[in-house]
Image: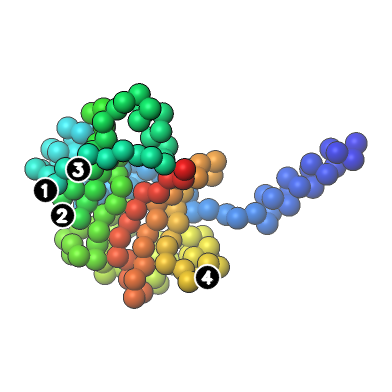
Amino acid sequence: MRIIYTFLLLTIFTQTFGQKSQIVKSNDIKINGNLLLFTSKNDFIAKIGKVEKIVEDFPECSNYDEEASKGTKFYIYTKKGIQYYVYNKKADFQEINLKDNSNNYISFGKYKISNKTTINDLKNIFPIAYKNYKKEENASLFRLKFNKKWDDEVQISIENGKVSAVYYWTPC
């Protein structure tokens, strides 16, 4: 009986005081207003045009391990500060540089994030992520999750009080 009470108390404590995450839907996030984070290679090229740089890559530490172990070739496609992992006819967002590419932006539903977006703007758009950001020592990233159970994150990088880049991060 003590085990059950202990379990219940731990569950309640974790739910009440545990780290809360800002949840976003991946289908609500678009690069430059039209490109989804996770799409096909053909859709990526149709929407972004001819890429400037293609580099073969091997994802040593990520959620691509299973695919890589099958011998799948991975490439990083880059155009004007936008990078996607391309493999098996798929294209997965990796990063968008907003600092050096003023025409780039990323939309989260009705909100447009660009190099003009400030910490105060992000505070209003993502209040939970802002609270977590303020708790970090030497904070430089707003962290958004797709799902409470996943460790993957969309990370919004802050430099000099403004958004400089957005990354997709996945743990080892």
Residue 128 relative to residue 29: left or right: right
* Amino acid, disc 4: Glu
Query: Which residue carries the number 2 mark?
Result: 80
Mark with earlier residue (1, 4):
1
The earlier-in-sequence mark between 1 and 2 is 1
| Distance Cα–Cα, label 3 vs label 1 | 10 Å
Label 2's element? loop
Which label lies toward us, 3 or 2? 3
* Disc 4 target residue: 137
Q: Residue at x 55, y 68 (%)?
A: 135
Residue at coordinates 68% horizontally, 57% vertically from top-left? 17
The residue where tag 1 is placed is 52
Give the camera-side residue of 113 and 86.
86
Nearer-N-terminus badge (4/2) = 2
120 versus 105 height, above or below: below
List the residue tagged with mark 3. Answer: 55
Label of residue 77 in the image: none
Residue furthest toward the left?
A: 50
Nearer-N-terminus badge (3/2): 3
Measure the alpha-carbon separation of dots 3 and 4.
35 Å
Asked whether the beta carbons under mark 3 and mark 4 sit within 8 Å of each other, the answer is no
153, above or below 3, in the image? below
Residue 70: image quadrant is top left
**Which of the two marks, 3 or 4, is nearer to us in this view?**
3
Label 1: state its secondary structure: loop
